[in-house]
Amino acid sequence: MSETIWIAIAIDGPAGAGKSTIAKRLAAELHFVYVDTGALYRTVGLAALRRGIDPTDVEGVESLLPSICVELTYIDDTQRVLLDGEDVSELIRTPEVSMAASAVSAMPAVRKFLFHLQREIASSHNVIMDGRDIGTVVLPHAQVKIFLSASAEDRARRRYDEMLAKGMEAVYEDVLEDMKQRDYNDSHRAAAPLKPADDAIMVDTTGNTLEESIAMMKKLVEESLA
Ligand code: DC
């Protein structure tokens, strides 16, 4: 019996580049499973905050890991992330959890803790996985690797609009400052820093509308898989 070859599309890039929105749409069109790996780091960040652990405290966060359970599940084709069985998909979207996620994601023990979960999904599904190290570390053999970026101002503007649309309060300057801080943290950490894989296709979405970016990415993916 021949072994099924699963297809993996890795989309990496900084926060707010449009990775998740674009990846979700592509996954729906291609009938692939969409995996938002940032949600996993956010969940560990939330767990630390809930237990009163400073997310920058390496020993504190490491001691938390054996006692938490992080899982992904899909309801109506939408990813939900569970912390000890509780659906925390919405709770992980606050600025405080974003910062906590950025801090805990710099810790090798956290990356190791979440690695197998990510690999496991890709070993039994066609996936579009987005994150920071998917093409470099998690799925180095992905058939398609895309590194998606845009200017910090463009990315902050999109994140700000998203927050307002969700009814959250936000100040553009604060969102931009957070964005720059997270970019710095994510690309300067020792463990799996944000950087394009050698064989990644570089895509810059600065100035594009969402629809333009989606069309551009769809064409790229189709050409790469042809
Ligand atoms: O994509 P996001 O903003 O939801 O990610 C939250 C944090 O998790 C971000 O600061 C970077 C980190 N992250 C990571 O280190 N590796 C990934 N594969 C995904 C996210």
Image (tube, rainbow, N blue to C red):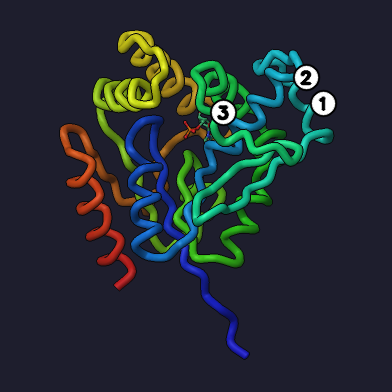
Residue under label 3: 92
Give the mark toward the camera: 2 or 3.
3
Which kind of residue does numbered mark 2 sit on? Gly
- Image quarter in which the N terminus is found: bottom right
What residue did someone put label 1 on?
Answer: 63
Residue 91: name its quadrant: top right
Q: In the displayed structure, does residue 63 sit left or right of residue 210?
A: right
Circle 3 Cα neighbour tier, 10 Å, few/some/many (<14 / 14–19 / ≥20): many
Tags 1 and 2 touching, CB below 8 Å: yes
As shown in the figure, which amino acid type bears the numbered disc 3? Ile
Label 2 secondary element = helix
Q: Is mark 3 within 8 Å of ligand 1?
A: yes
* Image coords of residue 95 (percent x, y): 49, 18
**Which residue is the site of mark 2?**
60
Location of residue 96 in the rendering, given as x and y in whole percent from the top left corner: 54, 16
* Circle 3 SS class: helix
Q: In screen coordinates, is 98 left or right of 222?
A: right
Mark 2 CB in 8 Å range of ligand 1? no
Within 10 Å of disc 1 (Cα), the crowding (few <14, some 14-19, many 20+) is: few
Mark 2 / mark 3, whichever is N-terminal? 2
Task: Classify 104 as above or below 110.
Answer: above
Q: Locate residue 123, reporting x and y percent.
A: 60, 64
Of badges 1 and 3, nearer the viewer stands 3
Distance from disc 1 to disc 3, alpha carbons, whole Å, reads 21 Å
Front residue of 182/42: it is: 42
In primary-sequence order, the first of circles 1 and 3 is 1
Q: CA–CA distance between discs 2 and 3?
A: 20 Å
Measured as percent of width and height from the top left, residue 202 is found at: 28, 45
Residue at image coords 49%, 59%: 33
Callout 2 environment at 10 Å: few (<14), some (14 to 19), or many (20+)? some
What amino acid is found at the position of numbered circle 1 in the picture? Ser
